Image: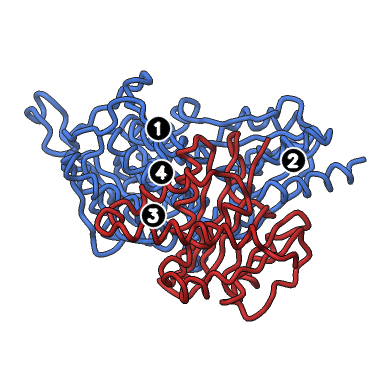
Amino acid sequence: MVNKLIKEDTKMFLTGNEVLAYAANSAEAEFMYGYPITPQNEIMHTWCKLLPKTGAGFLQTEDEISAGFSTIGGILAGKRAFTATAGPGNVIMQDAQSMAEMMRIPFVCAVMQRGGPSTATVIYAQQETRLTCFGGNGEGFRIVYSTAGHQDLYDYMIKAFNTAWKYRFPTYVLADGYQGKMREPVVLYDPASRGISMVPTTKALLAEGQIGVDRKSAHLRNTYNMEEELMGVLEGYKADYEKMSEEVQEWEEYKAEDAEILVIAHGIVARSARTAIDELREKGIKAGLFRPITIRPLAVKPLRAAVSRAKQILFTESANGQLAQMVLEKLYGLNTPYSTLFKMGVGVTGDDIVNKVESMAAAAV
Amino acid sequence: MSRTKIVLAGEGGQGVQSVAKILVEAGYEAGKQVLYIPNFGVEQRGGVSIAFCQIADETIGEPRFAKGDIIIMLSDRAIDRCSTYVDENSVVVYDTSVCTKKPEIKCKEIIGVDANKIANEQLSARVFNIIILGVLLEATHVLELGDIKNAMEQALGKKFAAKPELRELNYKALEMGMGLVKDRAAV
């Protein structure tokens, strides 16, 4: 057991990376494995700085391949372990993430997106959206929370541990370099004070009791001999995933009820959209926001309902339409026209969205 | 709703991010809503380093903004990189003793300060950025001098305790920076 540092509501002025380290501690995480890459370094820096007080553990591995597999190893050994990465690190960690998917490991990872492809920038992007949802060889049986600021980072990092340990799918907090590096006020709290009880950490291997008497044997496989054998397992996973989807899916609507132009955005860009929507409403343009919080799985029913109500939709991202691609597939059969505002690896400002929506509104007249 | 959008830009190593941290800490302690994003490349020194700061009375939405209320440019490259954040409502501040050119941008006002020269000749090269903080404080009036001094105490308190003359040096730098804006000649 680790010592939890946050025992009562505590308002602090932190970077997002610091918030994530505190959140992992509040979620009773016992061990972090990681390898440095900007812009997520301060998650491990903060985690390490707190170690004398928390009594938790940390291992810096030789790269992200190792960090990913070590995290799996830690979890198999019965520890509530997690990792964090970004950019090219997220790319090379995909092998381990696929293994976690195959073996149903409660793997928790914070991804702080930076510019891509390759090394690109150390600053910011939303270009790991597709990678985080569907990276690796597999089917994307993952849960991905896309956060929009520091309170989200704290809330959803805690939630990620519960989701991972309850449903046993790899679970991600997908943020970005802005959120990692920026400073803003945040309220840290003990999850119990919000009625949140943490799903206990259980041993995957060497559990208590006699095999065959007290418990079933643990046979965790990532290798199968027969095609049909594999498909049988994956069909089971798929059914579990679909059953769970309704329970975990989250979204946020902002002035979307009567919106004629519906902005669809995730993460920090959704925050710029809120600023823009307030300004557009003042100008008499009925704009609204649909923000998927779980970008995997998507909340398809509410999404389709909001899109059906609108006259036009706008996809905006700091990427070339990675979320749009995932969403459009779910909108099959609807014919609401859409426009795009994609800035690859660059922040989207409120002004960008205001200008775009104004031109859409003018064109519709 | 009042929101002040600040861009601080210079060369890596000039202390741009240190000043931004003191500024937003002061805003936070003063009970304002604040949001600060550091923006830099992979260099330890020598790249353009930019700090985007917002100080507001209400919750801040967009983390990055298109145009700033005040843009501080502390090198030629900062002028080139940050002219995009300027519009007709912006105040532009640049350091005449570092930059070899004047920003040629349409804006509300351009203020030239020779903070680097003053730091080197009258105070210490190390407080160049604190002079800039004084300039920023006087040019925006978004925070009180007392707020900034409190935040400096948080950031530099240990150094001040070891060498009390450092506190005086920093205060002097702050005041001289404020003076540069107060006493400016119309450009």
Q: Earlier in the sequence, mark 2 or mark 1?
A: 1
Who's the residue at 48% across and 42% down the image?
A184
Mark 4: which amino acid?
Answer: Leu
Q: Please state the chain letter of the residue tagged with numbered disc 2 in the rendered image.
A: A
Give the class, few, some or many, for how many residues have Cα within 10 Å of label 1's Cα (few <14, many ≥20): few
Of A355 and B151, nearer the camera is: B151
Q: Give the labeled residue for mark 4.
A: A14
The residue to which callout 2 is attached is: A313
Q: Is residue A158 visible?
A: yes
Residue at the spot 31% in from the left edge and 55% down from the top edge: B160
The Cα atoms of the two marked residues, 4 and 2, are separated by 35 Å
Q: Which dot, 4 or 3, sits closer to the camera?
A: 4
Q: Residues within 10 Å of mark 2 (few under 14, many from 20)?
A: many
- Numbered disc 3: what chain? A
Query: Residue A303, how many percent across, how many down?
Result: 64, 32
> SS at mark 4?
strand
Q: Which mark is residue A11?
A: 1
Residue at 75% x, 68% y is B187
Q: Is residue B164 left or right of residue B71?
A: left
- Identified by mark 2, the residue type is Ile
Label 3, on which residue? Answer: A40
Chain that the image shows in blue: A
Q: Are marks 2 and 1 in contact (CB under 8 Å)?
A: no
Q: Are marks 4 and 3 in contact (CB under 8 Å)?
A: no
Q: Disc 1 vs disc 4: Cβ atoms closer than 8 Å?
A: no
